[in-house]
């Protein structure tokens, strides 16, 4: 039990204490997987709590870490080339670890908020309400994680202001990929009226065109 | 191969184009191996482009289109290189630069390598969108945007490296009568050159004063021409991404132009594909 508690403390401390840069990438990866899976399971539980399938819990527990991992993996080659071209190739490893730390913090903050999700579900929330609540939690976690990323980058930013520009470009690229990936992997919140499927039948369509149709018609 | 990859990494990081590395007035890369790297990166990006055909067309057409895309990407850059190389050398000589033919050739090869590296690095994102959407105009425009970004960064690299080479060649001119130790090295305007080299990346300018305004304008125009030739070459070699509603064709008949097609794709995208 003690060693388990120590392990949890290592993950939490490593991911959430911004100045602690000595945490190994493996610990950060574990924090991302576990944190994401916990929040995913909580999101997916809406179906079970409203008379639907329990399979959504497993699906969403897989999907959130998959989402975080795939979005990062798709970005990695472009980030490396951009860092090299901007003359920051030597600091890429440090920047990558700082970004991983930010992702881990994001996942753990999400996980810490999952009890709120369950309480909200148990309070008789509608499906749309559940969707909105989760969007709110994700936004909150993203804002909180920004603070961790900024602190982790503080030393790098002090050394070279070009990191700020790359951070902004990287964030823009991540948002571009993440919106489409989240669209493909939906639903994250289990719909009690829908059959338990990992992907929706129209999963492989374009998120941006769907948004365009919603807002412009 | 490993040597060539190391050269590519040095180019990207700017190590190969630092003033101290350009002592001989040319980029020190293995010019025999760099084309193979360009070819390899082109094949990778072509494969990523081909993913749209693989997920939206019948297998017989899909693999033909994938092979065609993989072939066309290196051909596109190779042809653009061949079309623009003579003019770069001639313009370069006309504006008084002392770059040799080999230096210009290495410079263009290096710029292409940077372009292809940027393209290939964005390949996974293109492949992901190709697999996860069915909208043809969207994929077309995404690829145009990716090519434009790669072209922009590659040409920025070319301009800055050209500038650095000019700085180096200026410094290689015969020494002035006054001893070096007493007279600080200065540029055309009498400003000291000692602080030119910092830890600058491959895309960052060194001292702007060394290259005259007219020289910068000439190369600016040349870069524009390079971009336009590249765009039109891509139009001649189209389709790179096959329309899912049409059968496979290796080269489409000559009609319209690149810019009209891009505006047409934007129109179709905004009207719902």
Image (cartoon, grey):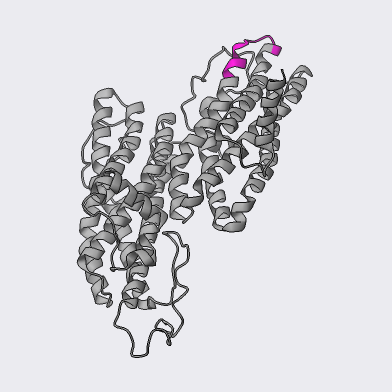
Q: Residue lying farthest right?
A: A123
Place of residue B4 in the rendered image (x, y in percent of width and height, measured from the top left): 29, 48
Depth check: give the residue in front, B124 or B110.
B110
Depth check: give the residue in front, A79 or A204.
A79
**Looking at the figure, which quarter contains the C terminus of chain B?**
top left
Q: Is residue A208 visible?
A: no
**Looking at the figure, which quarter contains the N terminus of chain B?**
top left
- Residue range in magenta is A49-60
Place of residue A81 in the rendered image (x, y in percent of width and height, measured from the top left): 43, 48
Q: Is residue A62 above or below residue B40?
A: above
Q: Is residue A162 visible?
A: yes
Left or right of A33 in this view: B112 = left
The image quadrant that residue B193 belongs to is: bottom left
Depth check: give the residue in front, B147 or A192.
B147
Place of residue B125 in the rendered image (x, y in percent of width and height, measured from the top left): 43, 38
Q: Residue at x 31, y 26 (%)?
A: B57
């Amino acid at each position: 039990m003690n060693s388990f508690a120590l392990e949890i403390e290592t993950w939490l401390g490593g991911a959430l204490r911004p100045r602690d840069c000595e945490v190994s990438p493996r610990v950060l990866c574990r924090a991302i997987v576990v944190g994401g899976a916990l929040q995913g399971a909580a999101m997916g539980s809406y179906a079970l709590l409203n008379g639907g399938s329990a399979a959504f819990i497993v699906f969403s527990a897989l999907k959130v870490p998959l989402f975080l991992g795939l979005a990062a993996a798709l970005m990695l080659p472009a980030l490396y080339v951009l860092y090299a071209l901007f003359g920051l190739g030597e600091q890429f490893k440090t920047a990558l670890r700082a970004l991983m730390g930010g992702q881990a913090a994001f996942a753990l903050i999400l996980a810490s908020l999952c009890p709120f999700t369950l309480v909200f579900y148990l309070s008789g929330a509608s499906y749309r309400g559940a969707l909105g609540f989760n969007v709110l939690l994700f936004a909150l976690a993203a804002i909180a994680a920004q603070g961790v990323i900024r602190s982790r980058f503080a030393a790098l930013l002090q050394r070279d202001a070009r990191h700020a520009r790359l951070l902004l470009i990287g964030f823009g690229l991540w948002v571009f990929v993440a919106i489409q990936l989240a669209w493909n992997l939906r639903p994250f919140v289990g719909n009690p009226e829908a059959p338990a499927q990992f992907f929706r039948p129209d999963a492989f369509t374009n998120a941006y065109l769907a948004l365009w149709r919603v807002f412009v018609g | 191969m490993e040597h060539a990859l190391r050269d590519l990494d040095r180019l990207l990081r700017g190590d190969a184009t630092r003033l101290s590395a350009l002592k001989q007035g040319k980029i020190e890369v293995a010019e025999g191996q760099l084309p193979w790297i360009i070819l390899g990166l082109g094949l990778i990006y072509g494969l990523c482009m081909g993913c749209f055909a693989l997920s939206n067309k019948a297998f017989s057409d899909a693999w033909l289109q994938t092979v065609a895309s993989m072939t066309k990407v290196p051909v596109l850059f190779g042809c653009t290189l061949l079309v623009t190389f003579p003019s770069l050398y001639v313009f370069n000589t006309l504006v008084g630069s002392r770059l040799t033919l080999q230096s210009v050739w290495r410079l263009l090869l290096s710029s292409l390598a940077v372009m292809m590296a940027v393209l290939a690095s964005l390949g996974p994102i293109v492949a992901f969108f190709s697999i996860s959407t069915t909208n043809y105009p969207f994929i077309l425009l995404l690829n145009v945007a990716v090519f434009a970004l790669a072209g922009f960064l590659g040409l920025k690299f070319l301009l800055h490296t050209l500038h650095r080479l000019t700085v180096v060649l200026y410094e290689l001119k015969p020494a002035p009568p006054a001893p070096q130790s007493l007279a600080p090295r200065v540029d055309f305007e009498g400003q000291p050159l000692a602080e030119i080299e910092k830890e600058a990346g491959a895309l960052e300018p060194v001292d702007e004063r060394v290259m005259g305004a007219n020289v910068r304008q000439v190369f600016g125009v040349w870069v524009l021409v390079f971009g336009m030739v590249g765009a039109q070459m891509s139009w001649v070699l189209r389709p790179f991404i096959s329309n899912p509603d049409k059968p496979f064709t290796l080269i489409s008949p000559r009609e319209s132009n690149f810019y009209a097609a891009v505006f047409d794709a934007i129109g179709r995208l905004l009207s719902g594909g």
